[in-house]
Amino acid sequence: MVSDIRERTFGFATRVVRLCQKLDAAPGVSRTVANQLLRSGASIGANVEEAHGSQSKADFTAKMYIACKESRETHYWLRLLVATDIVPEAKLAPLLDESNQLIAILTAIVKTARNGRAPHA
């Protein structure tokens, strides 16, 4: 399952990058939100990659926890884009759904790792 979450978060990050490229073309607030979204959305996969190379269970758990927090932040920025009518909800529905799923998966991985079982990331 390690490669699954690694590939999934990488795919999510590429979709976020593409969205941010489009948002960055517009002046003003959408550009500012795009910068925040890009940071958090790309950070999810980066932290999952770091967890994959962790040196200890504690390090693994900490990196996955950060990835989970970044997923929650990314979900917030996506919701904000919809709530402010910067992007129609229909266009962001797949990303919103995927961010919710990533939150659930990463939360489960962190709970499993904290309970002393072998991480299944």
Image: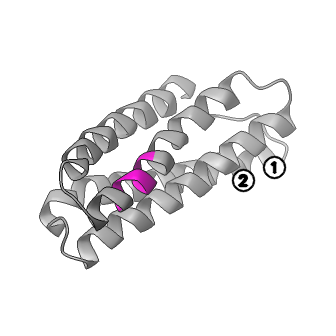
Q: Quadrant of the C terminus?
A: top right
The numbered mark at residue 114 is: 1
Mark 1 lies on a secondary structure that is helix
Where residue 108 appears, as percent x and y from the top left, is 62, 52
Q: Is residue 63 shown above or below 23?
A: above
The numbered mark at residue 98 is: none
Q: Give whichever of 105, 70 is nearer the camera.
A: 70
Residue 34 included in the magenta stretch of the image: yes
Tell whether 42 sits left or right of 89. right
Residue identifier under label 2: 111
Please name the residue shown 45% across and 37% down the image: 9
Please name the residue shown 82% across and 50% down the image: 115
Mark 2 lies on a secondary structure that is helix
Q: CA distance from mark 2 to mark 1?
A: 5 Å
What is the span of residues highlighted in magenta in the rendered image? 33-38
Tell whether 39 sits left or right of 12. right
Where residue 89 appears, as percent x and y from the top left, is 18, 68
Q: Give whichever of 25, 71 is nearer the camera.
A: 25
Q: Is residue 70 shown above or below 5?
A: below
Disc 2: CA contacts within 10 A as few (<14), some (14-19) or many (>=20) = some
Where residue 55 appears, as percent x and y from the top left, is 84, 23
Please name the residue shown 19% across and 46% down the image: 22
Q: Is residue 2 shown above or below 69?
A: above
Tag 2 near tag 1, CB within 8 Å: yes
Magenta segment, principal secondary structure? helix
